[in-house]
Image (spheres, coloured by chain):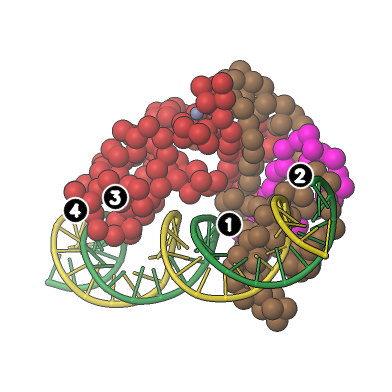
Chain colours: A red, B brown, C yellow, D green
Amino acid sequence: MTTPQLTKNQSLVFDVLEKAEGPLSAYTILDKLRDHGFRAPLQVYRALEKLLEYGVVHRLESINSFVACAHPGDDCHSHGIVAFAICESCGQVMEFHDHEVDHRLMEWVRGQKFKPEKTTIEIRGLCEACAA
Amino acid sequence: MTTPQLTKNQSLVFDVLEKAEGPLSAYTILDKLRDHGFRAPLQVYRALEKLLEYGVVHRLESINSFVACAHPGDDCHSHGIVAFAICESCGQVMEFHDHEVDHRLMEWVRGQKFKPEKTTIEIRGLCEACAA
DNA sequence: ATTGCACACGTTATAGCATAACGCAATTGA
DNA sequence: TCAATTGCGTTATGCTATAACGTGTGCAAT
Ligand SMILES: [Zn+2]
Ligand SMILES: [Zn+2]
Ligand SMILES: [Zn+2]
Ligand SMILES: [Zn+2]
């Protein structure tokens, strides 16, 4: 998926996510954009929908939050599964790929004749700094 | 985690999940138990909290739903990661383990000195029957 | 027996996440 | 020009989850 020119709202939402230390909920994004005229959740969700579609933002299913892609331009997104490690203390997110994990999961899927659309891998725990 | 005797509410919630064809939301469970005296979401959530703790129920993070464990008594739960394939058409859920996937993820985690607490692997798509 | 504690339970209220449905404006392309 | 698409704003609503308070019961330590 190639990324077209972002609209005003899409840019605002994306900038907020890029500058954030960690993942943000849609309502947190909304609050950060009230000064820029945002008034309703839909303004955020509609922008997020597009940003997800373009692959420049990821949704963290296990914490109902969104994060800017850590590997912009990386073509792994087009042929691999994205995985996340989420620190439950400081909120830091690490995004990574593992082709062997992809391969094993897709092997299993093939054996079941299951047709995958979207795969979620999220590891929640404590990052090195917070575990110390 | 060994499973103690379930309380009345826990049994009711578990039975509903066991008899269900697919995953259920907490509010769907609530509706199914109104005839048994359930009136409020907390009655469901409190039961689910324990059932999750005992490992007899799993939470599907990507669809905010709960499902009875498909492998009761299987000791994989104590030393492995549970993965799910969820059909977005018929709702059917397949639960499986893959030790190689576990191994690769834990290798990555070890390299980052990340301390994992809970790992989610969910593949959403179409099952064989629905994809046809 | 009395006290203290842990735990399950019931209820009300509230917080947090997400979408439906309407209408308007700008853009595009036939 | 006309139709289709897309983005946007607004209001209302629905779905998911927890806070906070109080009750009752069983059980162990004193
Ligand atoms: Zn990414
Ligand atoms: Zn941390
Ligand atoms: Zn299981
Ligand atoms: Zn299906």
Residue beneath disc 1:
B64
Mark pair 2, 1: CA separation: 19 Å
| Callout 3 amino acid | Asp
Task: Find disc 4 in the rendering and name its residue.
Answer: A37
Mark 2 near mark 1, Cβ–Cβ under 8 Å?
no
For the residue labelled by badge 2, is the local secondary structure a helix, a strand or a loop? strand
Question: What residue is disc 3 on?
Answer: A31
- Span of residues in magenta: B68-96
Is B126 or A58 nearer to us in this picture? A58
Q: Quadrant of residue B1?
A: top right
In this view, the mark in front (1 or 3): 3
Residue type at mark 2 is: Phe
Report x, y in % for residue B94.
74, 52
The answer to whether mark 3 is within 8 Å of ligand 2 is no
Q: How many marks?
A: 4
Q: Circles 1 and 3: CB distance less than 8 Å?
A: no
**Some atom of ligand 3 lies within 8 Å of the CB belonging to the residue at label 1:** no
Residue at 84% from the left image edge and 46% from the top image edge: B2
Identify the chain of the residue marked 2, using the numbered disc in the image.
B
